[in-house]
Amino acid sequence: ETRGALPEEDQYETLGQFYYALELAIDRLGKTTDVFANPQRERQLGDPSYYGAVEYDAEDSGGLVLIEDQASADAAIEIIVHQGEGLSDDRWADPSHQELTHYHKLLQIAEGTSPLGEVRPLLTNPKVAELPEEAQPIANLFNALYRYTILTLDELFQASDDKGALVDRLYALMGNALTPVARYLTEIAAGDGKMAGPTFEVHHFSGDPVAELRSMAAAVAEQHPTLAPVGEAL
């Protein structure tokens, strides 16, 4: 949408309109009730060490904000929007102009000025049952890992004094488990010039998720040895 587009609170068409509507809603509620009377700090990720700037990010390009009043809520929304997830079209994410916003990073890919790497013709909205037989156990493993990632996020936002172990688990799942499994799937031919890929179908654990994931990963690694490190990441 164009800069300054009006918010759409319900049937919004863009993320920018959603965040703008969220900001207005918080302001409206704040005039009638104390919506931050119980900010539940223990459920939030307020420790800066949980989200450090990675090697190609600027230190002051935005970090975690502890939400405890309307001002801090507005500040958090502003960071999200400014980084390129919403209405802002600013080029820089930090005051010293060291890091581009998400929007301009993606724009560089679209313009071909930033290399994207190999692009593969994946199936559209695939299902496990439609994939080649050899790919199905790998796709099931990905779905189980993805479900465990969601469960980990749910745990992170429960009241806890020490969230460090959960943060470490989250990063390990995303970087050392989901990423290699997804990439491996895209290297498997699925017919008609298309390649397989993650299906994002809901996986239901029958017992201990970690034990089940390790068993699934071990079974996959027997047929696909390069995926053996996935089990070690759990």
Image (tube, rainbow, N blue to C red):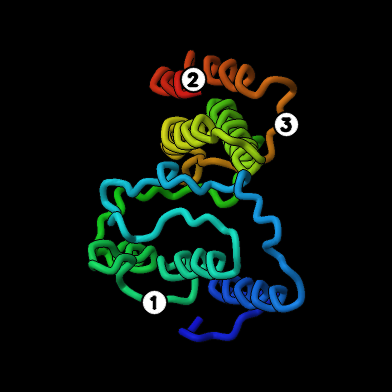
Using a 10 Å C-alpha cutoff, classify the residue at mark 3 as few (fewer than 14 neighbours), some (14 to 19) or many (20 or more).
few
In the depicted structure, whether residue 51 falls above or below residue 107: above
Is residue 9 visible to the viewer in this orientation of the structure? yes
Q: Earlier in the sequence, mark 1 or mark 2?
A: 1
Q: Is residue 181 visible?
A: no
Give the labeled residue for mark 2. 231
Residue 23 sits in which quadrant? bottom right
Mark closest to the chain's N terminus, 1 or 3: 1
Looking at the rendered structure, the kind of residue marked 1 is Asp
The circle on residue 22 is none
The residue drawn where x is 50% and y is 48% is: 46
Q: Which residue occupies 66% across, 40% down?
A: 159
Q: Residues within 10 Å of mark 1 (few under 14, many from 20)?
A: some
Question: In the displayed structure, does residue 114 sit left or right of residue 103?
Answer: left
The image position of residue 117, as x and y in percent, is 29, 49
Q: Are marks 1 and 2 in contact (CB under 8 Å)?
A: no
Residue wearing tag 1: 89
Q: Percent x, y for residue 81?
A: 47, 70
Q: Nearer the viewer, mark 1 or mark 2?
A: 1
User: For numbered disc 3, what is the local secondary structure?
Assistant: loop
Observer-nearest of 141 and 152: 152
State the residue in front, 112 or 88.
Answer: 88
Query: Tag 3: residue type?
Result: His
**Alpha carbon of mark 2 to alpha carbon of mark 3: how far?**
19 Å
Q: Residue at label 3?
A: 204
